[in-house]
Amino acid sequence: MEIWINPACSKCRSAVRLLDAEGAGYTVRRYLEDVPSPDEIRTVLDRLGLEPWDITRTQEADAKELGLREWPREAASRERWITALAEHPGLIQRPIITAGDGTAVVARTDEAVRDAMGR
């Protein structure tokens, strides 16, 4: 498993604490420092079964500056969203755990973290 985190995020810290408490094997990716490429974002989206707008933090300053709330949420705009996430990684919802079975979850709750550990 790999977990994408921002150490300043309380949900990320909580997820890491739970993984540690459960003795889970995982690697940490500080995605603000080790920024995912567009291809990596596409792969995670496929694993999540979500679209880029589903994992975008639209309340962030960068999102407001880009006007993301007005961007179309349709297949034709998918690459534009992915590029924005790659160029502004702070817009990516967190934490994201990639599970051993090839899936992924946005692990904002203890239940989601446990779900990822069980995959």
Image (cartoon, rainbow, N blue to C red):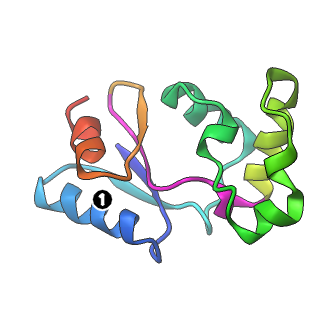
As rendered, which of 76 and 98 lies closer to the eye?
76
Q: Which residue is mark 1?
A: 15
Q: Residue 88's x, y, as percent?
A: 75, 61
Segment colored magenta: 88-100
Give the left or right position of residue 117, taking residue 99 as reference: left
Q: Residue 75's x, y, as percent?
A: 80, 22
Q: Residue 68's x, y, as percent?
A: 81, 51
Give the left or right position of residue 22, taking residue 48 as reference: left
Query: Residue at (68%, 38%) from the top-left corner?
Result: 52
Q: Quadrant of residue 81?
A: top right
Q: Give the residue at the far front of this rendering.
A: 70
Q: Is residue 26 magenta?
A: no
Query: Residue at (20%, 59%) from the top-left corner?
Result: 18
Q: Residue 13's x, y, as percent?
A: 34, 69
Q: How many marks?
A: 1
Give the left or right position of residue 98, taking residue 83 as reference: left
Q: Give the residue at the far left of this rendering.
A: 22
As rendered, which of 49 and 47 lies closer to the eye?
49
Compared to 108, does 50 lie above or below? Answer: above
Disc 1 residue crowd, few under 14, some 14–19, many 20+, Cα 10 Å: many
Could you tell me which secondary element the residue under label 1 belongs to? helix
Amino acid at the residue labelled 1 = Ala
- Quadrant where the N terminus is found in the figure: top left
- Quadrant where the C terminus is found in the figure: top left
Compared to 1, does 101 lie above or below? Answer: above
Q: Quadrant of residue 95?
A: bottom left
